[in-house]
Amino acid sequence: METAEYTNDTESKEGEMSFLDHLEELRWRIIYSLLGVIVGTIICWIFIDFLVDKVLLIPAARTGLKLQNLRPFGQIFLYFEIAIIGGIVLSIPNLLYQIWKFISPALRESERKYISLIVTFSSLCFITGICFAYFVMLPLTFSFAANFGSKRIENNFAVDEYFSIIISIMLAAGVVFELPMVSFFLSKLGILKPSFMRKYRRHAIVVIMILAAFLTPGTDPVSQIVLAIPLFLLYEISIFVSKISQKKN
């Protein structure tokens, strides 16, 4: 009995140590992620004037929007916000890498070899979503907003609302463009099957419309429709990706 109790105590201590090691690993992954965000934020702050004037204000200039600052220190806080969000976007590859490194001990050896590919293509999918939002969604959204309504009413936009729309649409598009990679990973783990996705395609359409309405700011129907269309296409692509992944398995 004493030997059995001693064995149980030893096993519990080992389990406690492994749990503490797991927490320690999580702590360092969070630190590495934050360091990446800080470095990205510093880089964005160095080029903040170019980022604001030559990138983020271009959609407003092309659609003829008139922006105005309504707060005493509005532009200062706005610049800090843009630098931080830009730092997060720049550090996306590092964030994804830290996430996969943290969960890699729970994966099989055959599954760990896909980490580099998943991080690379996930980053590319996110960047593609941001580019799609910038070059397609934003021009259509602001063109609709600038030209809608009576010509006797001048449409002037608060600059913080303008940047809020830009940032939310770009980040939302970046996230939804990750759908094929999520499908690939879940299919590799055997959680997701193409037959399941085809069976619930109609349900997915309803979810996509709700998701597009939730991810786009306000009640702008143009940005909702423009986001919903690539979501439909990404869902079909995800079925194809899941099918290929299962064939390889």
Image (tube, grey):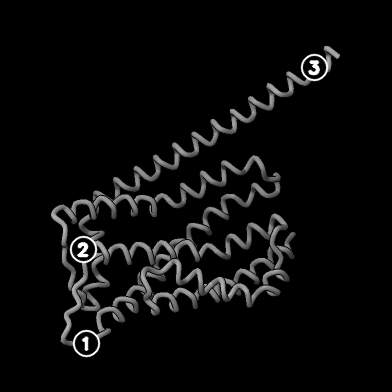
Residue 150: image tag: 1
SS label for mark 1: loop
- Circle 2 residue: 53
Direction left: furthest residue: 72
Q: Is residue 236 above or below residue 191?
A: below
Q: Is residue 221 above or below residue 4?
A: below
Please tell me how crowded label 1 is: few (under 14), some (14-19), or many (20+) other residues with Cα within 10 Å: few
SS label for mark 2: helix
Q: Nearer the viewer, residue 94 or 137?
A: 137
In the picture, the quarter occupied by the N terminus is top right
Q: Is residue 131 above or below residue 28?
A: below
Pair 1/2: label in front: 1
Q: Which residue is depicted at the point 65% across and 58% down?
A: 186
In the picture, the quarter occupied by the C terminus is bottom right
Q: Earlier in the sequence, mark 3 or mark 2?
A: 3
Residue 249 placement, left or right of 100:
right
Q: Earlier in the sequence, mark 1 or mark 3?
A: 3
C-alpha gap between disc 3 and disc 2: 70 Å
Residue 204 figure quarter: bottom right
Locate residue 79, reporting x and y percent: 23, 53
Q: Are marks 3 and 2 in contact (CB under 8 Å)?
A: no
Pair 3/2: label in front: 3
| Amino acid type, callout 1 | Ser
- Circle 3 residue: 5
Q: Earlier in the sequence, mark 1 or mark 2?
A: 2
Locate residue 217, reporting x and y percent: 37, 68
Residue 165: image tag: none
